[in-house]
Amino acid sequence: MVTYVATLDVPRHVVEFLARLLAAHRRRIGTPRRSRALGPFRQAVLVLRWFREAGCVHCLARDAGVSQATGYRYLHEGIDVLADRAPDLHEVLTRCREEGMTHVVLDGTLITSDRLAGVRENGNDLWFSKKHKAFGGNVQFLSAPDGTPLWVSDVEPGSTPDITAARLHALPALYKAAAEGLPTLADKGYIGAGVGIRVPVRRPKGQSEQALHADTRMTNALIRHLRALGERTAAELKQRWRALQRVTLSPNRIGDIARAALVLNEHWK
Protein backbone atom coordinates (compact mmCIF):
# COMPACT_ATOMS: atom_id res chain seq x y z
CA MET A 1 0.00 0.00 0.00
CA VAL A 2 1.42 3.40 -1.04
CA THR A 3 0.24 6.66 0.50
CA TYR A 4 0.42 9.89 -1.48
CA VAL A 5 -0.83 13.47 -1.19
CA ALA A 6 -3.54 14.67 -3.58
CA THR A 7 -5.27 18.01 -4.19
CA LEU A 8 -8.98 18.40 -4.89
CA ASP A 9 -9.35 20.93 -7.72
CA VAL A 10 -12.46 22.57 -6.28
CA PRO A 11 -12.49 26.10 -4.79
CA ARG A 12 -12.40 25.96 -1.01
CA HIS A 13 -15.54 28.07 -0.68
CA VAL A 14 -17.48 25.37 -2.57
CA VAL A 15 -16.30 22.73 -0.07
CA GLU A 16 -17.20 25.01 2.83
CA PHE A 17 -20.62 25.68 1.32
CA LEU A 18 -21.41 21.98 1.14
CA ALA A 19 -19.95 21.39 4.61
CA ARG A 20 -22.33 24.03 6.03
CA LEU A 21 -25.29 22.35 4.33
CA LEU A 22 -24.27 18.96 5.74
CA ALA A 23 -23.77 20.38 9.23
CA ALA A 24 -27.21 22.02 9.10
CA HIS A 25 -28.72 18.73 7.90
CA ARG A 26 -27.13 16.86 10.83
CA ARG A 27 -28.57 19.37 13.29
CA ARG A 28 -31.98 19.11 11.65
CA ILE A 29 -32.14 15.32 11.97
CA GLY A 30 -30.67 15.39 15.48
CA THR A 31 -27.32 13.70 14.85
CA PRO A 32 -25.33 13.67 18.13
CA ARG A 33 -22.03 15.55 18.02
CA ARG A 34 -18.95 13.45 17.20
CA SER A 35 -21.10 10.40 16.48
CA ARG A 36 -20.09 10.25 12.79
CA ALA A 37 -16.90 8.77 11.37
CA LEU A 38 -16.39 11.93 9.29
CA GLY A 39 -17.12 15.54 10.11
CA PRO A 40 -19.11 17.72 7.67
CA PHE A 41 -15.97 19.08 5.96
CA ARG A 42 -14.45 15.65 5.26
CA GLN A 43 -17.82 14.34 4.12
CA ALA A 44 -18.06 17.32 1.75
CA VAL A 45 -14.64 16.44 0.34
CA LEU A 46 -15.77 12.84 -0.27
CA VAL A 47 -18.93 14.01 -2.07
CA LEU A 48 -17.10 16.58 -4.17
CA ARG A 49 -14.42 14.08 -5.14
CA TRP A 50 -17.15 11.85 -6.51
CA PHE A 51 -18.75 14.68 -8.47
CA ARG A 52 -15.45 16.04 -9.77
CA GLU A 53 -13.49 12.83 -10.40
CA ALA A 54 -16.31 10.31 -10.97
CA GLY A 55 -14.29 7.92 -8.82
CA CYS A 56 -15.52 4.62 -7.41
CA VAL A 57 -17.23 4.98 -4.05
CA HIS A 58 -15.19 2.09 -2.66
CA CYS A 59 -11.97 4.02 -3.34
CA LEU A 60 -13.35 7.25 -1.90
CA ALA A 61 -14.51 5.47 1.23
CA ARG A 62 -11.15 3.75 1.64
CA ASP A 63 -9.31 7.07 1.33
CA ALA A 64 -11.63 8.61 3.92
CA GLY A 65 -11.18 5.69 6.30
CA VAL A 66 -14.81 4.54 6.30
CA SER A 67 -16.60 1.43 5.06
CA GLN A 68 -18.06 1.21 1.57
CA ALA A 69 -21.60 1.22 2.98
CA THR A 70 -20.86 4.37 4.97
CA GLY A 71 -19.29 5.94 1.88
CA TYR A 72 -22.47 5.34 -0.13
CA ARG A 73 -24.61 6.70 2.70
CA TYR A 74 -22.50 9.87 2.95
CA LEU A 75 -22.59 10.31 -0.83
CA HIS A 76 -26.37 9.97 -1.11
CA GLU A 77 -26.82 12.33 1.83
CA GLY A 78 -24.64 14.93 0.09
CA ILE A 79 -26.58 14.56 -3.16
CA ASP A 80 -29.88 15.01 -1.30
CA VAL A 81 -28.92 18.18 0.58
CA LEU A 82 -27.62 19.75 -2.63
CA ALA A 83 -30.59 18.72 -4.78
CA ASP A 84 -32.95 20.22 -2.19
CA ARG A 85 -31.31 23.59 -2.88
CA ALA A 86 -31.99 23.46 -6.63
CA PRO A 87 -34.29 26.27 -7.85
CA ASP A 88 -37.91 25.70 -8.82
CA LEU A 89 -38.75 26.31 -12.50
CA HIS A 90 -41.35 28.99 -11.72
CA GLU A 91 -38.85 30.84 -9.52
CA VAL A 92 -36.25 30.67 -12.28
CA LEU A 93 -38.62 32.05 -14.92
CA THR A 94 -39.75 34.86 -12.61
CA ARG A 95 -36.14 35.85 -12.02
CA CYS A 96 -35.44 35.75 -15.77
CA ARG A 97 -38.29 38.18 -16.43
CA GLU A 98 -37.15 40.48 -13.64
CA GLU A 99 -33.63 40.53 -15.09
CA GLY A 100 -35.00 41.43 -18.52
CA MET A 101 -33.83 38.34 -20.41
CA THR A 102 -35.05 38.19 -24.00
CA HIS A 103 -35.48 34.39 -24.01
CA VAL A 104 -34.45 31.14 -22.40
CA VAL A 105 -33.09 28.00 -24.08
CA LEU A 106 -34.54 24.54 -23.55
CA ASP A 107 -32.51 21.45 -24.37
CA GLY A 108 -32.33 17.82 -23.33
CA THR A 109 -29.44 15.45 -22.83
CA LEU A 110 -28.88 11.79 -22.09
CA ILE A 111 -26.85 11.13 -18.95
CA THR A 112 -25.54 7.63 -19.45
CA SER A 113 -25.71 4.96 -16.78
CA ASP A 114 -24.34 1.45 -16.45
CA ARG A 115 -27.32 0.14 -14.54
CA LEU A 116 -30.78 -0.84 -15.79
CA ALA A 117 -34.09 -0.62 -14.01
CA GLY A 118 -37.10 -1.74 -15.99
CA VAL A 119 -38.61 -2.90 -19.26
CA ARG A 120 -41.24 -1.19 -21.42
CA GLU A 121 -44.55 -2.81 -22.32
CA ASN A 122 -43.19 -3.73 -25.76
CA GLY A 123 -40.27 -5.57 -24.19
CA ASN A 124 -37.63 -2.94 -24.97
CA ASP A 125 -35.29 -1.66 -22.28
CA LEU A 126 -36.86 1.30 -20.50
CA TRP A 127 -33.55 3.10 -19.98
CA PHE A 128 -32.14 2.55 -23.50
CA SER A 129 -32.09 5.52 -25.87
CA LYS A 130 -32.28 4.53 -29.53
CA LYS A 131 -31.24 8.07 -30.49
CA HIS A 132 -27.98 7.89 -28.53
CA LYS A 133 -27.54 4.09 -28.67
CA ALA A 134 -26.82 4.05 -24.95
CA PHE A 135 -28.43 3.40 -21.58
CA GLY A 136 -29.21 6.36 -19.37
CA GLY A 137 -31.73 8.98 -18.34
CA ASN A 138 -33.24 11.94 -20.20
CA VAL A 139 -32.81 15.25 -18.34
CA GLN A 140 -34.12 18.62 -19.53
CA PHE A 141 -32.02 21.77 -19.07
CA LEU A 142 -32.97 25.42 -19.16
CA SER A 143 -30.31 28.06 -19.69
CA ALA A 144 -29.95 31.82 -20.04
CA PRO A 145 -29.13 33.42 -23.42
CA ASP A 146 -25.43 33.49 -22.46
CA GLY A 147 -25.39 29.75 -21.66
CA THR A 148 -25.61 30.01 -17.87
CA PRO A 149 -27.38 26.90 -16.50
CA LEU A 150 -30.63 27.88 -14.77
CA TRP A 151 -32.72 24.79 -14.13
CA VAL A 152 -32.59 21.01 -14.41
CA SER A 153 -35.59 18.68 -14.53
CA ASP A 154 -36.11 15.33 -12.86
CA VAL A 155 -35.00 12.30 -14.87
CA GLU A 156 -37.07 10.30 -17.33
CA PRO A 157 -35.96 6.93 -18.75
CA GLY A 158 -33.64 7.16 -21.74
CA SER A 159 -36.34 5.86 -24.08
CA THR A 160 -38.38 9.05 -23.45
CA PRO A 161 -38.23 11.62 -26.30
CA ASP A 162 -37.23 15.17 -25.42
CA ILE A 163 -40.65 16.62 -26.19
CA THR A 164 -42.37 14.07 -23.93
CA ALA A 165 -39.98 14.83 -21.06
CA ALA A 166 -40.52 18.55 -21.64
CA ARG A 167 -44.31 18.14 -21.51
CA LEU A 168 -43.98 16.38 -18.17
CA HIS A 169 -41.58 18.80 -16.50
CA ALA A 170 -41.27 22.14 -18.30
CA LEU A 171 -43.84 23.15 -20.92
CA PRO A 172 -46.74 24.26 -18.66
CA ALA A 173 -44.49 26.79 -16.90
CA LEU A 174 -42.84 27.83 -20.18
CA TYR A 175 -46.24 28.55 -21.77
CA LYS A 176 -47.06 30.94 -18.93
CA ALA A 177 -43.65 32.64 -19.24
CA ALA A 178 -44.10 33.03 -23.00
CA ALA A 179 -47.48 34.68 -22.48
CA GLU A 180 -45.70 37.18 -20.20
CA GLY A 181 -43.04 38.00 -22.79
CA LEU A 182 -40.34 35.39 -22.20
CA PRO A 183 -40.24 32.94 -25.15
CA THR A 184 -38.29 29.67 -25.20
CA LEU A 185 -35.92 28.61 -27.98
CA ALA A 186 -35.49 24.90 -28.69
CA ASP A 187 -34.27 22.55 -31.41
CA LYS A 188 -36.25 20.45 -33.89
CA GLY A 189 -36.79 17.73 -31.31
CA TYR A 190 -39.44 20.01 -29.78
CA ILE A 191 -41.48 20.61 -32.94
CA GLY A 192 -45.15 20.68 -31.93
CA ALA A 193 -44.38 21.79 -28.37
CA GLY A 194 -46.88 24.63 -28.61
CA VAL A 195 -47.22 28.40 -28.58
CA GLY A 196 -44.23 30.30 -27.20
CA ILE A 197 -41.71 27.51 -27.91
CA ARG A 198 -39.74 28.77 -30.92
CA VAL A 199 -38.22 25.95 -32.99
CA PRO A 200 -36.70 25.84 -36.50
CA VAL A 201 -38.96 24.85 -39.38
CA ARG A 202 -38.13 21.38 -40.69
CA ARG A 203 -37.34 21.14 -44.40
CA PRO A 204 -39.57 18.93 -46.55
CA LYS A 205 -38.53 15.29 -46.54
CA GLY A 206 -36.16 14.44 -49.37
CA GLN A 207 -35.55 18.11 -50.24
CA SER A 208 -32.68 20.46 -49.52
CA GLU A 209 -32.75 23.46 -47.19
CA GLN A 210 -33.19 25.66 -50.26
CA ALA A 211 -36.74 24.31 -50.61
CA LEU A 212 -37.70 26.54 -47.68
CA HIS A 213 -38.67 30.16 -48.23
CA ALA A 214 -35.84 32.67 -47.73
CA ASP A 215 -37.61 34.20 -44.71
CA THR A 216 -37.99 30.75 -43.15
CA ARG A 217 -34.31 29.97 -43.69
CA MET A 218 -33.38 33.27 -42.06
CA THR A 219 -35.65 32.52 -39.09
CA ASN A 220 -34.04 29.09 -38.69
CA ALA A 221 -30.58 30.64 -38.79
CA LEU A 222 -31.50 33.21 -36.13
CA ILE A 223 -32.96 30.56 -33.83
CA ARG A 224 -29.84 28.37 -34.23
CA HIS A 225 -27.57 31.36 -33.58
CA LEU A 226 -29.42 32.48 -30.45
CA ARG A 227 -29.71 28.93 -29.15
CA ALA A 228 -26.05 28.02 -29.67
CA LEU A 229 -24.72 29.38 -26.38
CA GLY A 230 -27.59 27.92 -24.41
CA GLU A 231 -26.96 24.45 -25.79
CA ARG A 232 -23.58 24.28 -24.07
CA THR A 233 -25.30 24.03 -20.67
CA ALA A 234 -25.23 20.26 -20.44
CA ALA A 235 -21.67 20.10 -21.77
CA GLU A 236 -20.49 22.63 -19.18
CA LEU A 237 -22.00 20.69 -16.31
CA LYS A 238 -20.71 17.34 -17.60
CA GLN A 239 -17.16 18.62 -18.07
CA ARG A 240 -16.95 20.31 -14.68
CA TRP A 241 -18.78 17.59 -12.76
CA ARG A 242 -17.55 14.42 -14.44
CA ALA A 243 -19.91 12.15 -12.49
CA LEU A 244 -22.58 13.33 -14.98
CA GLN A 245 -20.69 11.76 -17.86
CA ARG A 246 -21.64 8.31 -16.61
CA VAL A 247 -23.67 7.76 -13.46
CA THR A 248 -22.76 4.60 -11.58
CA LEU A 249 -25.61 4.84 -9.08
CA SER A 250 -29.23 3.89 -9.78
CA PRO A 251 -30.50 5.71 -12.90
CA ASN A 252 -33.46 6.90 -10.82
CA ARG A 253 -31.00 9.19 -9.02
CA ILE A 254 -29.81 10.95 -12.19
CA GLY A 255 -32.22 13.87 -11.76
CA ASP A 256 -31.08 14.52 -8.17
CA ILE A 257 -27.44 14.22 -9.22
CA ALA A 258 -27.92 16.71 -12.08
CA ARG A 259 -29.71 19.19 -9.79
CA ALA A 260 -26.97 18.82 -7.19
CA ALA A 261 -24.37 19.56 -9.89
CA LEU A 262 -26.36 22.65 -10.88
CA VAL A 263 -26.26 23.96 -7.29
CA LEU A 264 -22.52 23.30 -7.06
CA ASN A 265 -22.01 25.04 -10.40
CA GLU A 266 -23.79 28.16 -9.17
CA HIS A 267 -21.40 28.36 -6.19
CA TRP A 268 -18.26 27.71 -8.23
CA LYS A 269 -17.96 31.38 -9.23
Image (cartoon, helix red, strand yellow):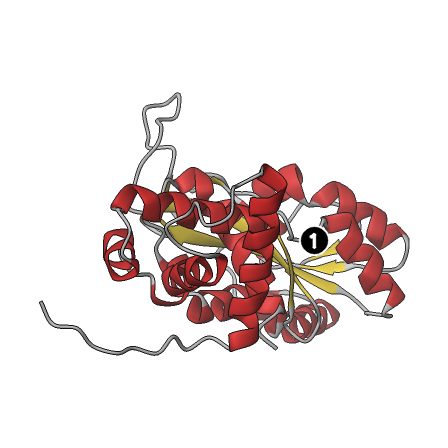
Residue 259 in the image: above or below residue 100: above
Q: Amino acid at mark 1?
A: Pro
Residue 104 in the image: above or below residue 12: above
Q: List the single residue furthest toward the left.
A: 1
Q: How far across and down, in percent of the image, does residue 200 sit?
A: 65, 61
Q: How far across and down, in percent of the image, does residue 24 sit?
A: 62, 51
Residue 216 located left or right of residue 102: left
Q: How many marks?
A: 1
- Which is more toward the observer, 45 or 260? 45
Asked which quadrant contains residue 186, the reply is bottom right
- Look at 75% across and 71% down and name the residue there: 215
Q: How far across and down, in percent of the image, does residue 188 sit?
A: 59, 56
Q: How far across and down, in percent of the image, does residue 129 sit?
A: 38, 44
- Look at 26% across and 62% down and name the residue there: 63
Residue 78 in the image: above or below residue 149: above
Within 10 angstroms of label 1, few (less than 14), some, or many (20 or more) residues?
Answer: some
- Which is more toward the observer, 14 or 89? 14
Q: Is residue 153 visible?
A: no
Q: Is residue 252 visible?
A: yes
Judging by the rendered image, the residue that carries numbered circle 1 is 87
